[in-house]
Amino acid sequence: MEASTVYYTDFRCPVGTSLTEKLRRLCIAAGIKSIDMDGKFVAIKMHFGELGNLAFLRPNYAKVVADLCKEQGGQPFLTDCNTLYPGSRKNALEHLSCAQENGFWPMTTGCQIIIGDGLRGTDELEVPVPNGEYCKTAKIGRAIMDADIFISLTHFKGHEATGFGGAIKNIGMGCGSRAGKMEQHSSGKPAVQEELCRGCHRCAKECGSDAIRYNENNKAVIDYEKCKGCGRCIGACNFDAIYSIDSSANEELDRKMAEYAAAVCADRPCFHISLVQDISPNCDCHGENDAPILPDIGMFASFDPVALDQACADACLNAQPLPNSQLGQNLAKPGWNCHHDNFKDSNPNVEWKATLDQAEKIGMGTRQYTLKKI
């Protein structure tokens, strides 16, 4: 496959130039205006940040992208899907409140916000995965699949399970419904924390396999002979009584995530933007953010999310670790087994290359790229 072009600009701003203007110029140079958006719905997938986290992208950046879409006649909306874990974004009402508290309003972003998989995280479409090996279909938030055009706006950072959170993670994991997230994260089936169960029977109503009954104390019990591990009961429970107990190995997680991303992007115009700044060691899903492990690097954009992630990863691998960070402290430990890999030295259990390997293998893009500075 021929190398893809990735466009890049740094964060230097001489007097009279703003970061938002630099992002606008980057998107235009990378070809966003070549997409026919006239009268079409445009999903802009981003992460609104967990409450307490301050590393997420500011809404000002989202407004740049939304305004570009509107200039081209598009009807943009910001979107994300509900989380699998308990937190401030596990249903649409709390998710919207979290987004608003973190500054995402129509006035600040220039467009509306739609939670992609609905109130409880169960509004999904089952989408074919092109050349899928681990997942033949992907459970994707319905509103995301209903859009005519898809744009990912990603905060590129470290991640405790996948090595880094880039465009492919933002798309694959981020666009999965709660059942889709469970399919990526887990090779097992959910369990019940009996002390948290209220006996409301909501989970049984949502179960499509008739796999949930109630014991003499009116607590939910899962029949594993019938359970298919879809995770709908997790989304149905308002009290976090049902949870995933068996996480997949990180490499398998990475490969499933790439396949989910391919399903989201197949057969429609897509464009991808990544901002490599505030490079925290862990995901923005945390209710906090540790000190950045690397200095701010720049903004990147491309039609190819695989090349984009590879370019951002390479830039991070070439960056100097920051002291007083998780990465810097690890490297300073006596006898530390250095991996010469800033992601793996920050979180040694990760296998981040598997994401790019699988994405390239199934034809989502190429890791070969030409970097063009703007």
Image (cartoon, rainbow, N blue to C red):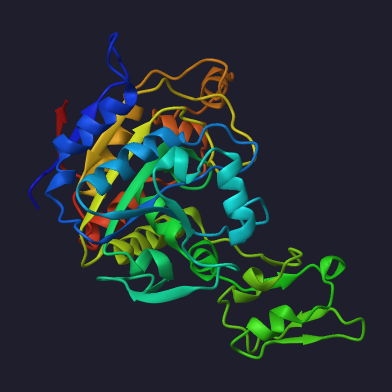
- Residue 141 visible from this viewpoint: no
Q: Nearer the viewer, residue 220 or 91?
A: 91
Percent position (x, y) of residue 233? 65, 75
Nearer to the camera, 25 or 265: 25
Q: Quadrant of the C terminus?
A: top left
Q: What's the residue at 25%, 70% (across, down)?
A: 130
Q: Residue at x 46, y 73 (%)?
A: 124
Say which residue appears at 46% left-offset and 33% top-offset.
Answer: 58
Residue extending farthest to the right is 217
In the image, 28: left or right of 261? Answer: left
Of all residues, the one furthest to the left in this rendering is: 2
Question: Residue 219 appears in which quarter of the rendering?
Answer: bottom right
Compared with 227, 141 (above or below) is: above
Image position, residue 28 (x, y; %): 17, 37
Foreground: 97 or 325?
A: 97
188 w.r.t. 226: above or below: above
Pick the front one: 232 or 259:
232
Q: Is residue 288 above or below residue 39?
A: above
* Residue 14 visible in the current orientation: yes
324 sits to left or right of 296: right
Name the side, left or right, on which 44 lies relative to 108.
left
Residue 280 point in image, percent of width and height: 51, 31
Residue 115, above or below 47: below
Tally of numbered discs: 0
Residue 340: x and y, percent? 39, 28
